[in-house]
Image: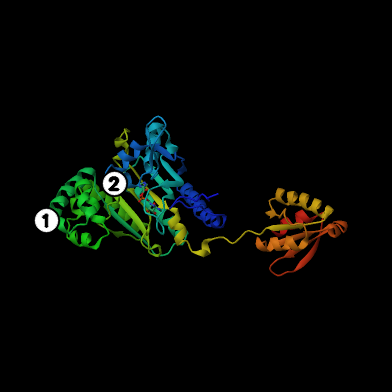
């Protein structure tokens, strides 16, 4: 029979990688909770319209990257390409405004985008995201960025750069966009095909095109900062002052416009120099207009999402905990096997990690199996040991062996491991 293979860009996470995943996920839970965020689990798929309306019909995600399929009743469904839209939909639908514990939400889980797979870019990937809802205070922006920065710092990720910008309020952005289009008109011949299209659909995206000729064409573009109204300007200044107060290093990147339409005011992105082409490791911003777009009351909010596969790629080996000590039970012979079975259960009942190999039946194959599993300790129990009411504990690294009494083995081993 032909082997059925996994899907391109959709990775298995084998057991050997789980210790790393546990490190990054446990820290995400711990830090988010310590900042007062509560976990939310939103559905993996939603009505397509949710993403079209929130992310924007002319963005790359909606135009090219969504996994969209008809439900049996013909309605259109989409696998979530990101988490913010689902969180806001849930917040509006369940009227979380009434519940003060639902203003700071975080999520960890898979997202789906039909992108060209390459190192650090997958079709199913995982995000740790937070959303702080219901405040327009610049301190909220600082709090969210501080959580993002602390997360990366505690994981000791190397080569991080935080870039920040303000897109201003929607009216500021509109004024800027008109001016920017007028600036681009005489330069159209220098733009790449994608950017030529963007001029009509999503002009600000021309600013963060990575192609050198487009970057050169927009080098002298009008600056977004000059179009910020007083409110946006003051907000941005307060955010930067807050980051200075917390000693979070940043640079102001006037080209940072982000690829999702729901942003206004503060936007930010962290890149990691060890990641190569796909170096954006986390990003976010304010989305003060999104609630209305999704039929809710005007509600300011800000959040970010971090790509966990990219975090794993940058995670130093020293951050991965060494294997916890555990015991391999090498029991053989008729009474030895019987004692081995009850001992295995007794050890597990007091919290000791213990295992055996049911396919191995003599000492030689049992020890070979323990070696293959890299067991640090082996308990040897044959019929002879049972008749003497004792066990042999073997340290697989030093090869030292010691005899311990069977009756008190569980408590002795619990004290040691
Ligand atoms: P985003 O910039 O589209 O923002 O994605 C956030 C992060 O997810 C990226 O910086 C990257 O680390 C990771 N990521 C994105 N696409 C892929 C991929 N194909 N493979 C691997 N990693 C990927 C958002 O998703 C917004 N919802 C963030 C946000 C939350 N804004 C406000 N609240």
In the figure, 110 relative to 88: above or below? Answer: below
Q: Residue at x 67, y 58 (%)?
A: 326
Residue 359 placement, left or right of 57: right
Give the x, y percent position of residue 67: 38, 43
The residue pinned by badge 2 equals 59
* Relative depth, front residue between 30 and 401: 401
Quadrant that contains the C terminus: bottom right
Contact between labelled residues 2 and 1, with CB atoms less than 8 Å apart: no
Q: Where residue 186 is drawn, which disc sits there?
A: 1
Q: Quadrant of residue 416?
A: bottom right
User: Alpha carbon of mark 1 to alpha carbon of mark 2: how far?
Assistant: 24 Å
Q: Residue furthest left?
A: 186
Residue 129 placement, left or right of 2: left
Mark toward the start of the polypeptide (1 vs 2): 2
Q: Residue furthest top?
A: 73
Residue 30 placement, left or right of 386: left
Helix or strand or loop: what does disc 2 sit on? loop
Helix or strand or loop: what does disc 1 sit on? helix
Report crowding for label 1: few under 14, some 14 to 19, many 20 or more residues within 10 A (C-alpha): few
* Relative depth, front residue between 413 and 41: 41
Q: Residue at x 25, y 60 (%)?
A: 211
Give the x, y percent position of residue 167: 25, 49
Q: Residue at x 74, y 49 (%)?
A: 345
Whether residue 281 can be seen here: yes
Whether residue 137 can be seen here: no
């Amino acid at each position: 029979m032909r082997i059925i293979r996994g899907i391109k860009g959709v990775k298995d996470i084998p057991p050997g990688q789980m210790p790393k995943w546990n490190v990054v996920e446990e820290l995400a839970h711990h830090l988010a909770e310590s900042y007062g965020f509560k976990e939310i689990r939103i559905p993996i798929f939603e009505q397509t319209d949710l993403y079209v309306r929130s992310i924007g019909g002319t963005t790359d995600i909606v135009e090219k990257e969504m996994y969209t399929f008809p439900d049996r009743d013909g309605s259109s469904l989409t696998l979530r390409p990101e988490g913010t839209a689902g969180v806001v939909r849930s917040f509006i639908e369940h009227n979380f405004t009434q519940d003060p514990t639902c203003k700071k939400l975080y999520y960890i889980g898979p997202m789906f985008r039909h992108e060209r797979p390459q190192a650090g870019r997958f079709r199913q990937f995982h995000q740790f995201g937070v959303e702080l809802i219901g405040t327009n205070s610049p301190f909220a922006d600082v709090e969210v960025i501080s959580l993002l920065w602390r997360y990366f710092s505690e994981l000791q990720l190397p080569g991080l750069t935080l870039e920040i910008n303000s897109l201003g309020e929607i009216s500021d952005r509109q004024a800027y966009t008109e001016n920017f289009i007028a600036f681009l008109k005489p330069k159209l011949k220098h733009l790449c095909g994608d950017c030529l299209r963007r001029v009509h659909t999503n002009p600000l995206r021309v600013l963060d095109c990575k192609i050198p000729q487009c970057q050169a064409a927009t080098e002298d573009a009008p600056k977004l900062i000059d179009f910020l109204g007083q409110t946006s300007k003051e907000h941005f200044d307060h955010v930067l002052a807050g980051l200075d107060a917390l000693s979070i290093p940043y640079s102001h990147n006037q080209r940072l416009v982000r690829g999702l339409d729901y942003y206004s005011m503060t936007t930010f992105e962290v890149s990691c120099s060890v990641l190569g082409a796909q170096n954006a490791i986390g990003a976010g911003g304010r989305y003060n207009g999104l609630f209305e777009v999704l039929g809710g009351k005007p509600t300011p909010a800000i959040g970010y999402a971090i790509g966990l596969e990219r975090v794993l790629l940058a995670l130093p080996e020293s951050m991965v905990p060494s294997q916890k000590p555990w015991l391999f039970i090498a029991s053989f012979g008729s009474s030895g096997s019987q004692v081995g079975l009850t001992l295995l259960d007794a050890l597990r009942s007091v919290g000791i990690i213990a295992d055996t190999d049911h396919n191995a039946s003599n000492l030689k194959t049992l020890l070979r199996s323990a070696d293959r599993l890299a067991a640090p300790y082996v308990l040897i129990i044959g019929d002879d040991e049972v008749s003497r009411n004792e066990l042999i504990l073997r340290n697989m690294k030093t090869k030292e062996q010691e005899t311990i009494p069977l009756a008190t083995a569980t408590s002795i081993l619990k004290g040691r491991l």
